[in-house]
Amino acid sequence: MSRNLRIEPNDNELSLEANGVLSKMLNNPDTDYVKAVDLCAVCENGSLRTIKKALSELTDKGYLLRIGNTYAVNKVRITQMKLA
C-alpha cells in the first residue's frame, strides 16, 4: 500500500506565502530547485511579485539557497526544521 506523505513546514515566523512556497518545493518529487517564474506558473493565485517576496524571505531565513535566478532547498537547514 502506497501512502502519500507530505513534508509541511511548521515555522510560525514565516508568512503564509513563504510556508506555501516552501511546502510546494519540499513536496515536489521531481526536483528541489526552481526559478520564480516557473513556480509562479504552478501557483494559481500567486503573482510573480508575491512569489519572489516569499522566495526572498525563505532565502533570508536559510530555508533556500539562491544561485542566480534559481532557488534550491537548503537540505542542511531542512533537517533541522520543525515539521507539522
Image (cartoon, rainbow, N blue to C red):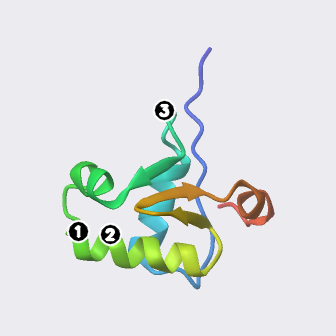
Classed neighbour count for the residue bearing mark 3: other residues with Cα under 10 Å, few (<14), some (14–19), many (≥20): few
Asked if the residues shown at circle 2 and circle 1 are in contact, with their CB atoms under 8 angstroms apart, the answer is yes
> Whole-percent x and y of residue 36?
33, 61
Where on the picture, by quarter, is residue 21?
A: bottom left
Give the amino acid at mark 1: Leu
Q: CA distance from mark 3 to mark 1?
A: 22 Å
**Distance from the alpha carbon under mark 2 to that under mark 1:** 5 Å
> Which circle's residue, 3 or 1, is located before the other in the chain?
3
Compared to residue 9, the image places residue 75 above or below, namely above
Dot 3 lies on which element?
loop
Please rate how many residues cluster around mark 2, counting C-alpha atoms within 10 Å: few if below 14, some from 14 to 19, many from 20. Answer: many
Residue plotted at (48% across, 32% down): 30
* Mark 3: amino acid: Asp
For disc 3, the marked residue is: 30
57 sits left or right of 17 in the view: right
Disc nearer the start of the sequence (2/3): 3
- Tell me the tag on residue 56: none
Image: 73 above or below 2? below
Q: Is residue 15 left or right of residue 6?
A: left
82 w.r.t. 26: above or below: below
Q: Position of residue 45 (x, y in %)?
A: 19, 63
In the image, which disc is placed on residue 51? 2
Residue tagged by mark 1?
48
Pointer 1: residues within 10 angstroms few (<14), some, or many (20+)? some
Give the secondary structure at mark 2.
helix
Q: Please, which residue is most extreme toward the front here?
A: 68
Q: Quadrant of the N terminus?
A: top right
Q: CA distance from mark 2 to mark 3?
A: 20 Å
Tell me the element at label 1: helix
Q: Amino acid at mark 2?
A: Ile
Residue 8 quadrant? bottom right
Residue found farthest to the top:
1
